[in-house]
Amino acid sequence: MYLPLAFIISLHPIIFCKAGKPKTVIQQSRQIKFSKMKKIMTASAVLILVSVLTIIGCKKQDQQTSDANLPALSQKVTNDFSTAKSNWNTHVGNLVTLQSFAVSGRINTEADRTAIINKISADDAMAAYGNILDETTMQLSSIGELQSQNSSSKKTILSYLDKQVNVGDIIVDVLWQTSKKSFTSTCIVHNDAIAWDNLLTGVFMMNKTPKEELTKGVSTTANAKVYNSWYKRTKSWTTDWVFGGERGYMECVIKINCYSNGYVYSTDRSDYAKMSLGNVISESKTLVDVGNFGKIQYALGVSTPNVTLKMNWNNFSVSAEGLGSKKVANGTETLAPW
């Protein structure tokens, strides 16, 4: 039986084609395989992309959860850090720049407390000292270098840390940058205030020249028949925290009491000094009590913890030993009526 030629040719394109025509089926097969592979690759890429986004999302969620668990600084302490950054970088930013600060945790246990104290007092921990308003006094060194200059430095620092660092305190990492390297100091926030940082609490702010105030008045006896005059001069130095607020103060006062003719019949004096987180000395004595004028001598000093202040009674003066922030003032004051 014979089938019509047109019918046979219509059955499949592979029949009665030229020698190269069978590639049509192979090409179709390859195209189908490529299409399947493309679909598989596309599906895999989508799966990988979803996985990556899921991982990133989980990490971000974990980070957000971690951040949410960190204690928050009060607005007051946040403002204190901002003030410290401004004061520091304005006056001694060329020595070392305060870059940033960030809460890193809380001291939850006694073991945490011990670990933080050891970290702050480690030999490679950095410290600064000096008066940031007088760049010539500023120094930056490690605790180890401090110890090499004064063998009792670390012992002194540890004794203060034992009082300043407590369970429940917030830990803040402060980032610093010098021309050669960057480093981090560990700052302790206690009772809504900066309690300790090797740099921030290691320095203070004090004007180079003291403040002087002159006052005078008139006093009378009980029957108001004898008039007396008094004259007073107060010389004072105020030290401030780099993050704001008064840290210390020292002053000497001379007061002369005069008759109406201007004769000095007595000279009064007083001295005073105070320092948060540090040491003080204040002494004074009268050199000239009566006559045409009064005269006193004073010896004053304030310092950070690792500086030892000593009083020399032979020459009536204060000296400071050890690397740290300090201010001593030795001198005399003379006052006559005006």
Image (cartoon, rainbow, N blue to C red):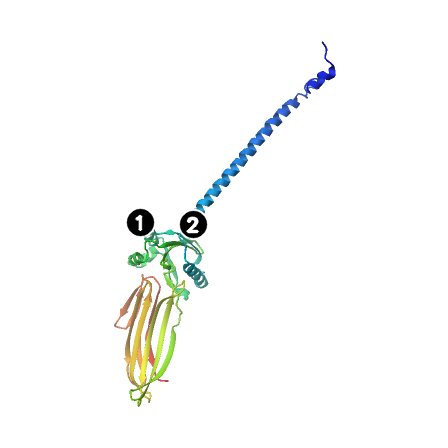
Q: Quadrant of the N terminus?
A: top right
The amino acid type of the residue labelled 1 equals: Ala
Q: Which mark is residue 111?
A: 1
Image location (x, y in percent) of residue 34 = 60, 29
CB contact under 8 Å: marks 1 and 2: no
Q: Residue at x 35, y 76 (%)?
A: 234
**Observer-nearest of 114 and 285:** 114
Quarter-of-image position of residue 259: bottom left
Q: Which corner quadrant of the image does residue 40 belong to?
A: top right
The residue lying toward the viewer, choosing from 65 and 114, is 65
Secondary element type, mark 1 = helix
Can the viewer see residue 44? Answer: yes
Q: Secondary structure at mark 2?
A: helix
Residue 194: percent from left, percent from top: 37, 59
Q: Name the residue tied to disc 2.
A: 68
x, y percentage for residue 99?
45, 56
User: How many angstroms separate mark 1 from mark 2 (CA)?
Assistant: 23 Å
The answer to whether 140 appears left or right of 12 in the picture is left
Question: Please, what is the three-letter code of the amino acid marked with disc 2?
Answer: Ala
Q: Residue furthest bottom?
A: 225
The residue under the point 47% across, 40% down is 55
Residue beneath the point at 46% across and 45% down: 61
Query: Residue 144's image quarter?
Result: bottom left
Q: Position of residue 328 (x, y in %)?
A: 33, 69
**Mark 1 Cα within 10 Å, few/some/many (few <14, many 20+)?**
few
Q: Evaluate whether residue 122 shows in this view.
A: no
